[in-house]
Amino acid sequence: MTVDITPFDLLRWYLDAGADEAIGEAAIDRFKAVSEVKREAPPPPPPAAKTAAPVSATAAHLADGCRTLADLKAAMEAFDGLPLTRTATTTVFADGNPEARLMVIGEAPGQEEDRAGRPFVGRSGILLNKMLASIGLERERDVYITNVLAWRPLENRKPAPDEVAVCLPFLVRHIELIDPAMILLLGGAAASAVLARNEGINRLRGQWHDFASPGLSHPVPVIASFHPAYLLRTPEAKRAAWKDLLMVKTRLDAKTP
Ligand code: URA
């Protein structure tokens, strides 16, 4: 018995099987196509101007030229090498006493800091002030505070690695100009940026590290601890943060950096 199959029958069969989209007029040998893709040379790297490195080089060049805190502040306020610099209301440079022995470094400004132009003025800042007071430190007198990023990331998201890379030369120059006796890093983003380590904050906190840089006459002792925003969400971590603060107090009291 012969069955007559018309082109319409075939189309119906394809439709029933789910093939309802015409891809091309001619048949494609997919096996050949795959082997040709495998033989193709790797795609060329993207043009250099589109990567973070040259922007970072610009920041490094600008930062290197800064001889004073005022120079650095002016250079950062004029910097437009990151989209964040255009969406932020202010450049959040620093707060506190530039002569203080303790430099505190957080992550990035939030909405309130962006409005005020000062780091740590929101809920995290209120807790930070209490933490400092608990070891006898007054924010305006005994501490100098800044952030890894001077510009607020929208939606309060974490700083992206390329944003940190771009801002790092400014931060390093900031540390060199302050030349603190010791540094307290708040949170994983600050810890991994300054210590150039990939481990999480749980691994990095609770011990002394060194921060060295060509512009410093000697390495600066650094300790990392939990970010106040994390402590607000995770009160059970306050016990460990308290231990870190006591390590800072002991070292400050000993007057040996
Ligand atoms: N969180 C930070 O890390 N820095 C601020 O300035 C405010 C909140």
Image (spheres, rainbow, N blue to C red):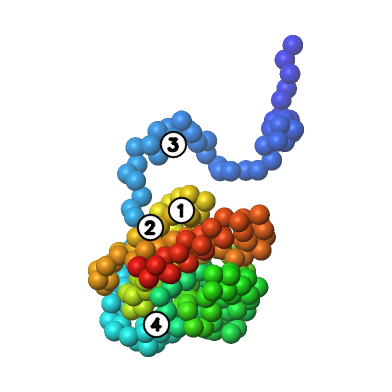
Residue lying at 44% horizontally and 61% vertically, measured from the top left: 223
Q: Position of residue 61 (x, y in %)?
A: 29, 76
| Separation (CA) of disc 1 from disc 4 | 27 Å
Sooner in the amino-acid sequence: mark 1 or mark 4: 4
| Separation (CA) of disc 2 from disc 1 | 9 Å
Q: Position of residue 22 (x, y in %)?
A: 62, 43
Residue lying at 53% horizontally and 79% vertically, measured from the top left: 139
Q: Look at label 3 and name its amino acid.
A: Ala
Q: Residues within 10 Å of mark 2 (few under 14, many from 20)?
A: some
Residue 156 seen from this side: yes
Which residue is situated farthest in the front direction here? 254
Q: Residues within 10 Å of mark 3 (few under 14, many from 20)?
A: few
| Separation (CA) of disc 2 from disc 3 | 54 Å
Kindly identify which residue carries mark 2: 209
Q: Look at label 1 and name its amino acid.
A: Leu
Sooner in the amino-acid sequence: mark 2 or mark 4: 4
| Separation (CA) of disc 2 from disc 4 | 22 Å
| Separation (CA) of disc 1 from disc 3 | 49 Å
Q: Are marks 2 and 1 in contact (CB under 8 Å)?
A: yes
Kindly identify which residue carries mark 3: 33
Q: Which mark is residue 204?
A: 1
Q: Residues within 10 Å of mark 4 (few under 14, many from 20)?
A: some
19 left or right of 165 in image: right
Q: Residues within 10 Å of mark 1 (few under 14, many from 20)?
A: many
Quarter holding residue 101: bottom left
Q: Nearer the viewer, residue 34 or 21?
A: 34
